[in-house]
């Protein structure tokens, strides 16, 4: 069986308005496809920028909110074990803790100790 053109109805080919409508439809489709094809690089570039910004934002958020355990150097509790401070604050922040003989200031550092905690240096003892 022979394939029929898209504008054939019941084996009879209609000309005139049907052909004109079909031709107009093809022109509109070709125009739309050329617009989409021309806009594709800009769309992909924008999508890449959005993805990079999202990944950097997620990484920064996770890095900022990670829990860290700090050992307060030269400080022990009543049982003789080192005093630990758990926080999400970044290195360089000064905290105040009561370590038994009154409040004392400690600076959080990025120095990792052998027990996988970070060092918090006392500030008031060195003055």
Image (cartoon, helix red, strand yellow):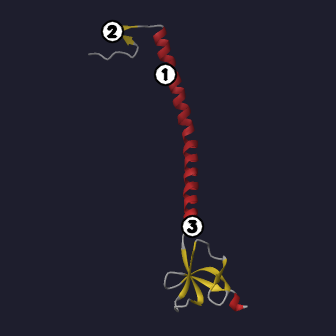
Rounded to the nearest angstrom, the CA distance separating label 3 from label 2 is: 72 Å
Report crowding for label 1: few under 14, some 14 to 19, many 20 or more residues within 10 A (C-alpha): few
What residue is drawn where x is 66% and y is 76%?
A: 93
- Depth check, mark 3 against mark 1: the one in front is 3
- Locate residue 44: give its quadrant: top right
Residue 26, numbered label: 1
What residue is drawn where x is 49% and y is 84%?
A: 115
Dot 3 lies on which element? loop
Q: Is residue 22 left or right of residue 63?
A: left
Rounded to the nearest angstrom, the CA distance separating label 2 from label 1 is: 22 Å
Residue 11, numbered label: 2
Residue 20 % position (x, y): 50, 12
Q: Are marks 3 and 2 in contact (CB under 8 Å)?
A: no
Q: Quadrant of the N terminus?
A: top left
Report crowding for label 3: few under 14, some 14 to 19, many 20 or more residues within 10 A (C-alpha): few
- Locate residue 61: give its quadrant: bottom right
| Disc 3: which residue | 65
Between residue 21 and residue 64, name the one nearer to us.
64
Decide: is 94 above or below 14. Answer: below
Q: In terms of sequence position, does the residue under pointer 2 or pointer 1 come before the other? A: 2
Q: Is residue 15 left or right of residue 70?
A: left
Q: In terms of sequence position, does the residue under pointer 3 or pointer 1 come before the other? A: 1
Residue 103 % position (x, y): 67, 85
Decide: is 97 above or below 19. Answer: below
Residue 113 % position (x, y): 53, 84
Between residue 99 and residue 71, name the one nearer to us.
99
Q: Quadrant of the C terminus?
A: bottom right
Dot 1 lies on which element? helix
């Amino acid at each position: 069986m022979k394939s029929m053109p898209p504008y054939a109805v019941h084996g009879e080919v209609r000309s005139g308005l049907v052909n004109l409508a079909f031709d107009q439809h093809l022109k509109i489709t070709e125009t739309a496809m050329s617009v989409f094809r021309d806009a594709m690089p800009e769309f992909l570039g924008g999508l890449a920028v959005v993805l990079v910004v999202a990944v950097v934002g997620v990484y920064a958020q996770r890095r900022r909110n990670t829990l860290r355990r700090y050992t307060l150097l030269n400080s022990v509790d009543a049982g003789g074990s080192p005093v630990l401070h758990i926080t999400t604050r970044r290195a360089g922040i000064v905290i105040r803790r009561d370590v038994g003989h009154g409040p004392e200031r400690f600076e959080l550092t990025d120095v990792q100790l052998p027990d996988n905690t970070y060092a918090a240096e006392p500030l008031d003892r060195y003055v």
